[in-house]
Image (cartoon, helix red, strand yellow):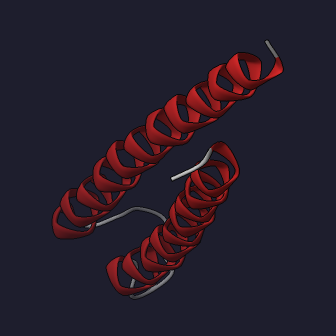
Amino acid sequence: MDARQQQQRELMEMQQQLLMFKKVSKLAKRCYARTITKAGNALSDSEKKSLGFCVNRYFDTQLFLTERLTAKARKMQENAGMEAK
C-alpha cells in the first residue's frame, strides 16, 4: 500500500470515528430523555442513578473517541512529515 492509499485509509477511519461520535451523542440524548420522565423540582433516586450512568458512559466514550482521533491525526502528521523528506 503506497503512502497516498494509507492516508486515504486513515482519513476514512477518522471519518468513521466521527460518525460514531455523532451516534454516541444521539444515544446520550435518548438516554437523558428516557431518564427524566417528568418535570419537577428534584430528581428521584432512580432518575439520579440513571442520569449518572448516562453521563459516565457518555464521558467515557467521548474520551475514548477523542484519544483515538488525536492518535490518528498525530500518526497522519508523522506520515506526512516522512513523505516530505
Residue 47, quarter of the rendered image: bottom left
Question: Which residue is depicted at the point 37% across and 77% down?
Answer: 31
> Which residue is situated farthest in the right direction here?
84
Q: Which residue is at the front of the view, 37 or 21?
A: 21
Question: Which residue is depicted at the point 83% across and 20% down?
Answer: 84
Marker count (numbered): 0
Q: Which residue is at the front of the view, 44 or 68?
A: 68
Please, is residue 34 above or below residue 68 in the view?
below
Residue 83, quarter of the rendered image: top right
Please, is residue 11 above or below residue 67 in the view?
below
Question: Which residue is depicted at the point 64% across and 34% down?
Answer: 76
Residue 60, quarter of the rendered image: top left
Left or right: 3 in relation to 68: right
Q: Which residue is at the front of the view, 42 or 72?
A: 72
Please, is residue 33 above or below residue 18 in the view?
below
Left or right: 64 in relation to 44: right
Left or right: 72 in relation to 33: right
Image coordinates of residue 50 in percent, x first then y, are 23, 65
Please, is residue 79 above or below residue 41 in the view?
above
Image coordinates of residue 64 in percent, x first then y, are 38, 41
